[in-house]
Image (cartoon, rainbow, N blue to C red):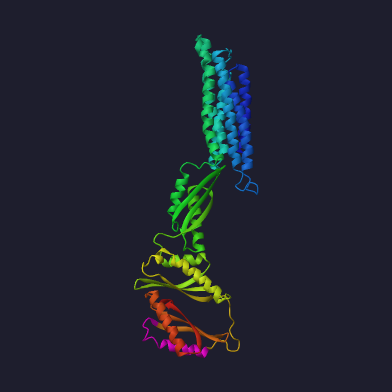
Amino acid sequence: MAALGSIGSALILVTLKVFLALATGSLGVLSEALHSGLDLIAAILTWLSVRVSDRPADSGHTYGHGKFENFSAFVETGLLLCTSVYIIVEAFVRLLFKEVHLQPSALAIVILGVAMGIDLIRSRALARVAKEFPSDALEADALHFSTDVWSTFVVILGMATVWIGQYTGIAWLRNADPIAALVVAAIVIWVGSQLGKRTLDALLDVAPAGLQKQVTEAVEGLDGVLSTERVRVRRAGNQHFVDVTISVPRSASFEQVHAISDAVEQRVAEIVPADVMVHMEPRAAAGEHLFDAIRAIAARRGLAVHEISADQLDGRLFVELHLEVPEYLTLRDAHRRASELEEEIRRLPGVAGSSQRFDPVVNIHIEPLGTHIASVDGQRGEMTGLGRAIENYINTLQNEYHELVDCHDVHVRQVEEKILASCHCAMDGSLPITQIHDVTGALEDRVKEHFPQVARVTIHPEPLEER
């Protein structure tokens, strides 16, 4: 609607100024008529470009149609500059070679004043809409109408000066009209060059000044971002596109990395509304722990590891861990995966440089990665009697293991001809988990020793207050 209003306003202004140019013979008025004629063309281009640029992205224009606005503004700039050249040439011809008799009148000045008022109202209305719905095309149109205000004022001043010269007989005042035209041309060239630079920058994907640095500094301050490696910014119409490449800890999980990406998108959106694309590069954090490095290597290979430990004996580093492999693998295939993992672990700086006299030792325990969901043997079901016996036995060990408060929720079942037991043990919640882990391991061993028929015991430790 704002663009259509501009077309109507420009059409009225062109009609008024062409009439005045024919009636007065003023080059200043003619230059204004040509300027308004271009404004009419520009308003039509703006209306068309706004309609096109509002279309959503499609298979042919995956970044949307916003560039149509920039192209429209660039064409408008070219038209303005061509008009300015014509005005300048004609002004010098009238100053140096040809004298044109003008017929200024109060009516002409009044009409130009009305035109200036229309320009002022439309420029303010367009500027308001362009700010509300960020649009280069509407802003360019508002700029055109605002320059018309000043140029029309200059033409009025030039015509009034010529009129005064005719009544006073001062000869040199007759040159005020072409001089006013030159001033109009200068205004148009200045405004057109500024607009042309902006639209050309948008067409050439020049990043808005300072925006790249602002985005870089903001992203680097987010938790989980080690560094910002690259930021690219481009603008199409009223929309910005921001591509950010960041480095994240290589030990972070996929969910954690995704959360970091969401935080980056949200932070960039707080700076400038934009379509944000985040690319993550896994990197080793400064001072990365040896165990985190081992987990990162295993994760990159698609392997699951646990029970990682390391110790030094007589200057030699021993690294041990458990590796889970698919249960369908043969020993040969599983051993090959373990050997490849061992070699990469040995090349880690924290391992390779641990001693100059002895090679580090990496020992990997291989176990199957469980995927099979077993069924409880139907004939035996849950063995409640054995469960009560295990619960009573564990509770008799409280004197030996002061960490243990009580044992409860014991379940015993027979699965594929193996007896499995599980239970909950309440313990002192203030104790370190390493100590609790040692206690639960010892309790599991004691149960299997006392009840040899039990193949596996799983103890879940929990704080006493959450029992």
In the displayed structure, 373 sits above or below 65; it is: below
Front residue of 263/230: it is 230
Front residue of 400/140: it is 400
Q: Position of residue 461 (x, y in %)?
A: 44, 78
Front residue of 95/303: it is 303
The quadrant holding residue 351 is: bottom left
Q: Which residues are magenta?
A: 384-404
In the displayed structure, 53 sits above or below 18; it is: below
Which residue is farthest left? 314
Front residue of 62/122: it is 62
| Visible residue check, residue 149 | no
The quadrant holding residue 402 is: bottom left
Which residue is farthest right? 59
Tally of numbered discs:
0
Q: Residue at x 44, y 56 (%)?
A: 226
Specify whether residue 16 is painted magenta: no
| Visible residue check, residue 244 | yes
The quadrant holding residue 463 is: bottom left
In the displayed structure, 307 sits above or below 265; it is: below
Q: Give the quarter of the figure containing the C terminus.
A: bottom left
Q: Position of residue 251 (x, y in %)?
A: 46, 63
Q: Position of residue 292 (x, y in %)?
A: 44, 66
Q: Give the quarter of the figure containing the N terminus.
A: top right
Which residue is farthest front? 357
Specify whether residue 396 is painted magenta: yes
Q: Residue at x 50, y 56 (%)?
A: 280
